[in-house]
Amino acid sequence: MTFPAFFDTCTLYGAALTDLVLELAEQGAFRPLWSAHVLAELEVAVARRGIERSAIRSRIAAMQSAFPDANVTGYEDLIEDMSNDAGDRHVVAAAVRANAETIVTFNLKHFPDAALSNYDLEAVHPDAFLLDQLDLYPKLTLNAVEEIAASYESPPMTTERFLELLARAGVPQFAARVRADL
């Protein structure tokens, strides 16, 4: 079974980063996990940027269609037992229910080691997570970056421009390493 990684809402927020994460998952680098709660938060957060709800729902539906086993259910009874930040206890509960090994999040302070260690979970920043993917699957990861950049049509995108977007999205070390490796 592929490495199970639970994605917090903040990691799925930006299109460039989400495209890369989902492409790596599609290629079999890891198994992505999320919950209905995370996807509901995602819809609200992206809508605040002025994106049409129908477009957001369409993207979420495409994610769910591409990864039908990613949605974690049956975790609600665990939420109150979690000891991390109250607003993110649903994330840990769902990750525990799914037997995830990692929670990928920009918000590391809401997931302290003391709240995760009993569940053999760790929280990792998306930059560190992607650097791990690059170390484990260098050719696959580099190809994914180039393929995603080439797939953007409106507007067209170069690999360099895609790496700039990733750096601005919060994964600058990953973008720099890919730039050096290409």
Image: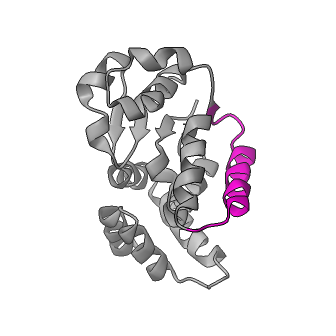
Vertical order, 127 against 76 (above or below): below
The residues colored magenta run: 50-71
Residue at image point 49% right, 59% down: 141
- Quarter of the N terminus within the rendering: top right
To which quarter of the image does residue 51 belong? bottom right
Residue 52 in view, yes or no: yes
Is residue 58 inside the magenta stretch?
Answer: yes
- Quarter of the C terminus within the rendering: bottom left
The percent coordinates of residue 4 (x first, y second) are: 51, 33
Vertical order, 68 against 83 (above or below): below
Residue at image point 41% right, 34% down: 88
Residue 35 in view, yes or no: no
The percent coordinates of residue 105 (x first, y second) are: 39, 45
Vertical order, 35 against 51 (above or below): above
The percent coordinates of residue 97 (x first, y second) are: 53, 20
The colour scheme used here is one colour
To which quarter of the image does residue 107 belong? top left
71 or 66: nearer the viewer: 71
Residue at image point 46% right, 42% down: 8
22 or 13: nearer the viewer: 13
Is residue 19 inside the magenta stretch?
Answer: no
To which quarter of the image does residue 87 belong? top left
